[in-house]
Image (tube, rainbow, N blue to C red):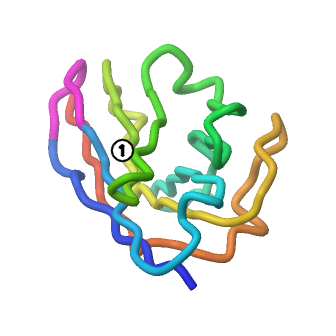
Amino acid sequence: QVQLAESGGGLVQAGGSLRLSCAASGHYFSAYALGWFRQAPGKERETVAGLSWNGGDVYYADSVKGRFNIFRDDATNTGFLQMNSLKPEDTAVYYCAAGPIPITNELGPGGFPYWGQGTTVTVSS
């Protein structure tokens, strides 16, 4: 069982940066893939980025490539999403997830067994 808690969201102007954290407690976080997802009001949850347990496989949605970076620190059981050059369309609730999921170009929220409660990111224009 893994419990996840996101932090780091907030209000930022367009062009700014935020770093989201995903603190994990419990067992086996280091053995699980890490995913970041977001859901804007009135929209479906979408994949932002994913990172395999060993860091060997990574996925980014086209909309965030070159701006966002996913990484993890297994020594502290923490996952991160560094978000740069933020745009108003990045406004959403961001969720981290973990699980024994392969990281592929078809990465989606389905199949991840462990989820955080979400943190809100608002980007003003």
Task: Classify residue 57 by image quadrant.
Answer: top right
**Residue at left offset 69%, top offset 31%:** 56
Q: Position of residue 114 (x, y in %)?
A: 59, 75
Query: Would you place residue 121 above or below residue 113 in this image?
Result: above
Q: Position of residue 75 (x, y in %)?
A: 37, 52
Apparent side of residue 66 relative to residue 98 in the rendered image (left or right)? left
- Foreground of the two, 24 or 35: 24
- Asked if residue 36 is positioned above or below residue 71 in the image, the reply reads below
Answer few, some or many: residues within 10 Å of disc 1's Cα (few below 14, many 20 plus, some between 14 and 19): many
Residue appearing at x 53%, y 50% in the figure: 36
Residue hosting label 1: 91
Q: Nearer the viewer, residue 102 or 17?
A: 102
Please give left or right for residue 88 compared with residue 98 in the image: left
Q: Is residue 45 above or below residue 71?
A: below
Helix, strand or loop at mark 1? loop
- Who's the residue at 64% across and 42% down the image? 54
Is 106 located above or below residue 64 in the figure? Answer: below
Q: Is residue 101 magenta?
A: no
User: Residue 20 placed where, x, y %?
Assistant: 31, 47
* Rendering quarter of residue 67: top left
- Span colored in magenta: 12-18
Q: Quadrant of the N terminus?
A: bottom right
**Residue that extends furthest to the front in the rendered view of this protein:** 75
In the rendered structure, which amino acid carries the disc numbered 1? Answer: Thr
Quarter of the figure with the C terminus:
top left
Residue 13 is inside the magenta segment: yes
